[in-house]
Amino acid sequence: MTTSAPIAVLGPGSLGALLARLVAQGGQPVAWWGGENAPLVERRARRRGERDAGTTLPPEVRRCAAPEETLDAARLVFLAVPAGALLDLARRLGERLSPDRLVVHAAKGLEGPSGRRPTEILAAEVPARRLGALGGPYLVAEVLAGYATTLVVGSRFDEVHQAVHDALATERIRIERTHDVVGVELAGAAVVALGAAAGLCSGLRLGSGARAVLLARAQQEAMRLGVASGATAETFGGPAGLADLLVVTADPEGLGYRFGRRVGAGEPVGSVREDAESRTEALRALEGLRAIARRTAVPAPTIEALRSILVDGAPPATTLDALLRSGS
Amino acid sequence: MRPEEGREVVEEVVRRVQADVLASCRTSPAGALESLINDAVFHETERLRRERGRGREAQVERTFWRRAQHRLQHATEIELVALLGDIVRWHAGEIVGRFDPRVYRFTIEVVPWILTVGLNTAAPRRMLADLPRLPRVRHNLIVRGEIDLARRVDDLGTILLVPTHSSHLDSVTVGWSAADIGLPPLTYGAGLNLFTNPVLSFFMHNLGSYRVDRKKKHELYKRVLKEYATVTLERGYDNLFFPGGTRSRNGAIERRLKLGLLGAGLTAYVNNLRRGKPKPNVYVVPCTVNYHLVLEAETLIEDYLKEEGKSRYIIEDDEASSWRKWLKFLHNLWQLDSKIFITYGRPLDPFGNPVDDQGRSLDARGRTLDPRSFVLRDGEPVHDAQRDAEYTKDLGRAVVETYRRDNTALGTNVLATAALGLLRARTGQSDVYRLLRAMRPAEPFRLREEVYPVVEAVLDGVRRRAARGELRLSEEIDRQDAAAVTAGALRHFGTYHQEPVAVRQGPDLVVRNKNLVLYYHGRLSGYGLDDEATAAAARL
């Protein structure tokens, strides 16, 4: 069953454009806002002959100059912005995201030191109640190339599951549904954080055994934090958790991965963070996970250690060495 | 409601439940209807077998269910539908309440006056001091909170009043308070055990109560019960029921609610929208009741401790079943000049949003919003069982949060919290069960050196929380020092209960009934005060 109500996609990055493209491919009307500089970015990419989600957008996608324009009669709204940008966008849209809309975010990450999950931010800022989180393993380039994958939609509401399925499911894209929103969001945040951890291991030239142990421990801690926050453990072992982790930690082009690798290679955290190219959600995710660990009183020594290296600038080699020797 | 309207309501309930069941059976595997009826017959037959009732009513019930069982064995599909209708009608007939305005007027105007004068003979000094005015119930029942707003939203729609539940006295006190603040008569969902006493039963019947039999656990009964509440709400009858389902066993404010009946408000609201009713709104009004002493405290806490997590759920032989106990309790209430606090919380819409002073729904940022937009699909209000169940969970959370904020700290709760902190520090046990086992039968504490400092710490804790809007204070807690609060609490603790909770012996406070200490402490649990009390006791 497809709905004829238009679908709004708000997202300046390649993910927003990808979602808009998938919706349009399914034959549904879609309005897309790609950020204030979207037309410029698109023109530049086209001139250079770059193939990304933005440049391949079909003409049926209605491009909007402002996020408000996308909403009109939209019932389903995708917010494809990073967790760090979600609060500003939610505040900007405010009551326009009214209770009759279904709002799904694709922000893998957490707010930062508050530890708020994206749906918690939305619940505090907009009247829409039927919220959802999109997770799962995907690389934009692979989806564009037609590789099959599974996306996960976490929402308390079956209506949201159905609407996302109708909007995005294709022969190559399977939509998995779960009521475990907390699990999808925290698994996603852990994946983002561990992308940087994988880069860190690469920069440090840790062996694959130590790297695997480090990532497995951190993933287990994130799962415990999730369970203490109301998630189910299975979510962390599924597409939104383990599957996504395998993709992100094997992608050396990911922002988090690159950030971690530079720190591991000996660059001071401060100077890496100053580089706009390296701004990453991983740091916010690590801050958020630590906040949740403190709130739930669940020990998370690996996450603590990664945070101290990537946020505070603790010496990577000695910190990880001590951690791996501790056998927690 | 009048008897003729009661019949209409029953028929409406039958029609709706039948339609609803048949619609859901159509999408279920074959035999779903038979299975549903079978479940009802089985549960009812088993219940009657366990209860072994001998009265005429029990006999009639047994005959009905025996016949139902027989009909079920040979029923064709058409006969199954007819049997479903008969069972639904049977349950609706059991549930339906009636309302007699004469009994209502008598109850509201005359009974409190008789009660007050009669019971004030127990406190002649106070009555003399009040002369020439006669004492009034209002002196002991303090009704506060969002009273004006409750009246206002009653004009704008229909009210679903959902109080906390710690005593059978709640039905009386909350019902009286609603009449006192000018709300129309309420339709009650009252436990069957309140109908066992013939006098109380007469009043309950004629004041619009409908019977809720919690022993009937099968699906069909629950559907009928919820539909009954829904239909009465749609007809504009303000409803009252206790969403905790049963009286709090450990004295604590409810943290989990039974969401089935609570969802009736949302169903009624959507039905009102679909019919285009001019006043479709349903407002849920949380109401928090606090007593210095609780009529049935001994039985309730005993039940809690005996079968933690497996309590009997329906207790029929507690203090509330004895008139003597009721009179003694009320006598003490008046004699001690004890106050009962009934706090009306800010009304909520059926989605758990608070409303403003004009009854408009507000979002988390305080902006007004149109509640219809929560249930619209393609511009039309629609039911969606899964969606509505989630909205009702949100409503339940909002009600619980209101209970917490409107909970009133009283002297007995403060002293019990302090005493438990002292006991924890002395025994080194934090686990309640070990703590109770470790206690001596009469545990003494030095009043001046031990009790007062810890009471002071708890007072400080509740005042700080009250300043942050996390709970409310009674006047005594707001103004008195530790010694005065302790003395007031001990006056209450020394009377009414078979064994005093705690007494003063010379320079000591002696804890006599540890279970009741746990019970009265319960009202302040969950605020983090236990740790503060224990830390204060450990510092001594």
Image (cartoon, rainbow, N blue to C red):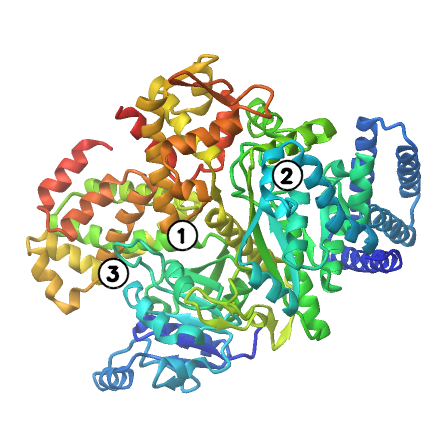
| Total number of numbered discs in the rendering | 3
Give the crowd class for mark 2: few <14, some 14-19, many >=20 residues within 10 Å: many
Residue B387, position as x, y percentages in the image: 58, 60
Above or below, B510 against B351 in this view is above
Where disc 3 sits, the SS reads helix
For this rendering, which residue is in front, B510 or A37?
B510
Q: Is any atom of residue B388 visible in this view?
A: yes
Q: Please give the label number shown on residue B246.
A: 2
Q: Quadrant of the C terminus of chain A?
A: top left
Where disc 2 sits, the SS reads loop
Read off the residue under disc 3.
Answer: A281
Q: Is B344 left, or right, of A116 in this rendering?
A: right
Q: Which amino acid, mark 2?
A: Thr
Read off the residue under disc 1.
Answer: B469
Q: Is any atom of residue A145 visible in this view?
A: no
Residue B340, position as x, y percentages in the image: 57, 42
Residue at image coords 73%, 73%:
B275
Q: Is B248 left, or right, of B59 in this rendering?
A: left
Q: Which amino acid, mark 3?
A: Glu
**Distance in Å between CA atoms under marks 1 and 2:** 27 Å
Above or below, A158 against A298 in this view is below
Q: Are marks 3 and 1 in contact (CB under 8 Å)?
A: no
Residue B261, position as x, y percentages in the image: 66, 51
